[in-house]
Amino acid sequence: MKKLLFLTIIISLFFACNQKEKLYDEVMDVHDHAMAKMDKIMSLKSEIKEKIQTLEMDTTTDHSDEINEMNGLLQDLNASDESMMNWMREFHSNYETQSRDEVMDYLENQKRLIEQIGNNMNDVITDAEEYMEK
């Protein structure tokens, strides 16, 4: 009987650790997909800045509305970039002082947060690409 109880406890601990690791891996997968978009964000920021400079040099036409719109896109791209950087700075993977439930809650929240950041990055990239294709 004691052997069965011991075996049950060991199996439960094993599955609890596996669930934690699985959820952590899911969070990291979402993060990795979002991080892959950072190059595109940097590229778009560079393109937009270059276009702004070109328009500012053209003194024959008033481009203020277009420049304002591009500055808004730059702000959105910068905010998206900064959201990712903040998430990475604030994310922690040291759970020694937390219960299993606390760790699972934390990872679920982090997964939702990084999914929102990734979705925002997609939206901002789409907006900037569509604008640059005009």
Image (spheres, grey):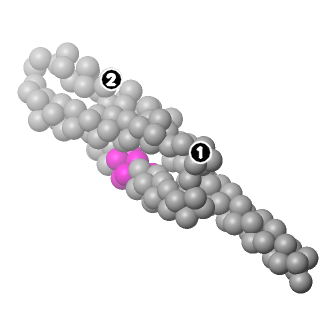
Q: Quadrant of the N terminus?
A: bottom right
Observer-nearest of 83 and 5: 5
Identified at 32% across, 38% down, the residue is: 79
Circle 2: residue type: Glu
45 relative to 90, above or below: above
Residue 52's image quarter? top left
- Label for residue 93? 1
Circle 1: residue type: Ser
The 10 Å Cα crowd at callout 2, few under 14, some 14 to 19, many 20 or more, is few
Identified at 37% across, 51% down, the residue is: 120
Taking the view exactly as shown, the residue that stands out farthest to the front is 2
Observer-nearest of 130 and 116: 116
Task: Please say whether residue 70 is visible from this viewpoint.
Answer: no
Question: x, y percentage for residue 54?
Answer: 26, 21
| Proximity of marks 2 and 1: CB atoms separated by less than 8 Å | no
Mark positioned earlier in the residue sequence (2 or 1): 2
Identified at 33% across, 23% down, the residue is: 50
1 relative position to 101: left or right: right
Question: x, y percentage for residue 77?
Answer: 34, 38
Q: Quadrant of the C terminus?
A: top left
| Residue picked out by circle 2 | 50
Q: Which residues are magenta?
A: 118-126
Question: What secondary structure is found at the residue carrying circle 2?
Answer: helix
Observer-nearest of 58 and 126: 126
Residue 57 forms part of the magenta stretch: no
